[in-house]
Image: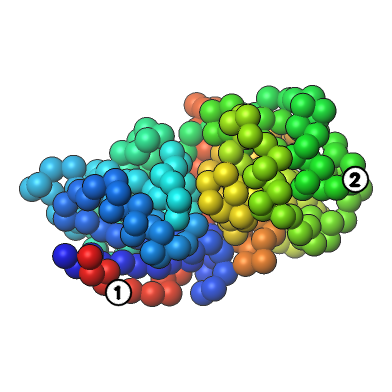
Amino acid sequence: MEIPVFTLDSFTNLPFKGNPAAVCPLMHELTDELYQRIAAEINLSETAFITRIRPSDDFTKASRFCLRWFTPTTEVNLCGHATLAAAAVLFKYKKNVNSTLVFETKSGELLVTQQGEGFVMDFPLNPPTKQDPNEFRDIIKVALGDRPVQEVHLNSTTKKLLVRLPDDCDRSVLTSLKIDSTALECSERSGRVKGLIITMKGSPECQPGYDFYSRYFAPWAGIPEDPVTGSAHTVLGSYWSEKLGKNKLLAYQCSKRGGELELKVRDDGRINIAGQVVTVLQGTITV
């Protein structure tokens, strides 16, 4: 069996930046074991599998599809950059005629709309709640050492822990962090945390005017550091919208690759996440 595969860089307009995802449009569903083995072979942070809902559907005319995401070690419930990449494959290479696509996923229906040179995703908003930093002192110690922390929040749905650095921190403190992913994974075994967000206030007065910066680490899902993370911004968007008193935000995830996200926090408990996508590879997997 031959399966088409595309590799795309999401949340960037340049190749080798942003976050790479593999996308496989499938004529038929595969076994969970085979999905996982393909994702492990590709070995990117996420591989997305698109399947048709009805046998009579085709990738050009249908507006609804099933979508699943796998890291090299496990299936995940929500992934932003691979959803963006999946929509780009359908719009650009399958020539889908619809202006908006609907993906049926483990996180419910996710909509993606073409907008200019990029795409806008309609995702659930995941507000975090404030926590006592002492409850997470082990994970904070591994990630930040003795550096001070301003606030700690947790979203129990996504199991993402948000740690905010003080406002007087220089951005270089965030970008220069070197975290031992094995030690980080071992520091939290309760199951409460499956991803660590480290964030700080941005520099809106300096062009291009980022409202906040972040990095994201998820060794619990087989991802030491994710370059640009749409799902993390369902938490970050909620947090920073409340802190800054605005619903439109420009974010930069300052991993080594780096990526930019445009956010709009809505009143209906949803968030729009916009970004561009660049294709870097097309090929075929033979299994």
**x, y percent for residue 222:** 53, 51
- Tell which circle, 2 or 1, labels the residue nearer the N-terminal end: 2
Quarter of the rendering occupied by the C terminus = bottom left
Front residue of this view, candidates 245 and 129: 129
* Residue 283: mark: 1
In the depicted view, which residue is nearer to us: 202 or 78?
78
Q: Give the answer, above or below, for where 282 lies relative to 75.
A: below
Query: Residue drawn 30% across and 74% down?
Result: 283
Q: Where is residue 42 shown, x and y percent of the image? A: 40, 65
Query: Of the residues shown, which amino acid type is indicated by label 1?
Result: Gly
Residue 199 location in percent, x, y? 74, 46
Tell me the tag on residue 124: none
Residue 186: image quadrant is top right
Position of the N terminus by quadrant: bottom left
Q: Is residue 188 left or right of residue 232?
A: right
Label 1 SS: strand
